[in-house]
Every structure is written in structure tokens, then in C-alpha cells.
Amino acid sequence: METESYIINDVKPIDVSSKIKETQSVFNQLTYTHIPVEKDGLYLGCVSENDAYCFDNTKTLSDFQYALEPFHVLKDTNWLDVLEAFAMHNSNIMPVLGNDNQYLGYYELGDIMSLFNNTPFLNENGGIIVVEKGIHDYSFSEISQIVESNGIKIYGIFISELKEDTVQITLKVGQSGMNSIAQTFRRYNYVVVSQHEEDKFIDDLKGRSQYLDKYLNI
């Protein structure tokens, strides 16, 4: 997806020679977790709101240059990588640099999230199924084959949990045929973690369990 059109440049970077008091004043006017900082027109990094309010406000940003966080993305960075950068740095603003490291502006987290919201994974009607298997035993090609062999489309797939020995994969698929997909996954030794109303396998287990309880209580 195209992200360059989302670059904003209405907030200019603060010069590293600025007083901390001035930096705090800027944060008072904005809702950002970080503000870009530059020196001689070159991007140095971001100062966080938490740090800005902890610094001695009689000093300048240059006195605390060691605390600047140099995170950024490039103008041609894929939107998923941009979203990952937001998550890694716990920020709601992401500086964007050109190929020559020239500061171009920044992305807002909400704008990048809107790209994700517009993907078929969230927009298309469908069902969610979560499966689990040994970390060395699964493959995306096999998972895709299982779903598509049931005549169902895949709208999205990702690893939602990673443990030492197992991995959980979340899929969004066409809404019909959830029971047949779940049954096929089990035949391929996947554990179906998510619950599905039409899952006859679970209903059968419950029925057998109730029958066994009655038998044992005779």
C-alpha cells in the first residue's frame, strides 16, 4: 500500500540547542509521545515526552543528546514495517527520512492503522480460526492447502503466538465451512484452539463426556 501520501510535516523538528523548557511547552500543545530533534538541519532522533518532563528545564536538549531515540523509517518502507516500528518504539509518531537521510516529515500511528483497517483481513466478512502445531511441523503452504481444499478463500494469515515448542497461527477465511476446515486441520494434526459454534467435533466430545458421566454414576 502507498504510504508516502500520509507523511505529515506540520510539526517541525526541535533544534538540539533548544531549552528543555521550550521542549516541554511544545509537548503541552501536542498529543505526541515523541518529538523529532535536529542539528544543523539533520535528524538526530526523538525526545520522548517522559524524558522531557524529567530533564532540568534550565538546560538544553544538547545536554541530554544521549537520551535521544534515533528511530525512524524511510519513505519507501513497507507499511507493515512502519507499523512494526511504531510497536517496537512505543510511539504514536514516526519520523520519515529520505534516501539521503533528509527529514521529510512523520507518520501518525492512527493513519497507518487505518491502512490495516482497510485490508480484506478486517473488511471482508469471514470467520477467524486459530490453530496450533509444533514449531517445526507446520508450514504456511500446508495451512493454505487445508483451507483451499475445502473451497474456502483466505483473507489473512499470521503467527499470533510463538512459544518454545509450538506456534499458533490465526487465519481469517470465508465464513462458510468452518466445521469442515476445523476437521481437516485435525486430520493434519493441528490443534484447533478457537471455538466454533458449528464444530461437531466439540459437540461429539461433550456428548460422549456426558454419556460417560451417566455410565459411571449408574
Image (cartoon, helix red, strand yellow):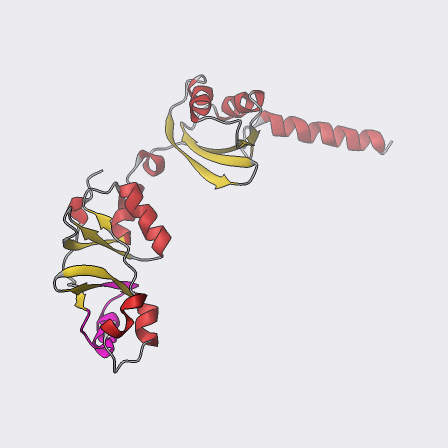
At 25% from the left and 83% from the top, the residue drawn is 58
Q: Which residues are magenta?
A: 16-36
Residue at 41% in and 29% down:
173
**Residue 47 higher or lower than 169, as above or below:** below
Can you say whether 167 is above or below 59 in the image? Answer: above
Q: Is 173 drawn above or below residue 47 in the view shown?
A: above
Instruction: Tell me: 162 left or right of 48.
Output: right
Give x and y (percent) for residue 94. Answer: 25, 54
The residue lying furthest to the bottom in this view is 58
Check the image and name the residue furthest to the right: 218
Q: Is residue 1 visible?
A: yes
x and y percentages locating residue 135 in the rendered image: 53, 32
Give yes or no for residue 213 being in the magenta stretch.
Answer: no
Toward which corner of the image does residue 103 lie, by quadrant? bottom left
How far across and how far down the image is residue 188, in percent?
A: 55, 21
The answer to whether residue 120 is left or right of residue 218 is left
**Residue 194 visible in the snapshot:** no
How many marks can you see? 0
Instruction: Name which residue lies at 41% across and 22% down.
Output: 152
Q: Is residue 10 above or below residue 62?
A: above
Q: Is residue 70 left or right of residue 142?
A: left
Q: Residue at x 69, y 28 (%)?
A: 207
Classify the position of the C terminus by image quarter: top right
Which quarter of the rendering shows the N terminus? top left
Does the magenta run of residues contain 18? yes
Residue 129 position within the rendered picture, expressed as x and y whole percent measured from the top left = 48, 33
Residue reaching furthest to the left? 41
The one of 189 and 211 positioned closer to us in this rendering: 189
Residue 189 falls in which quadrant of the image? top right
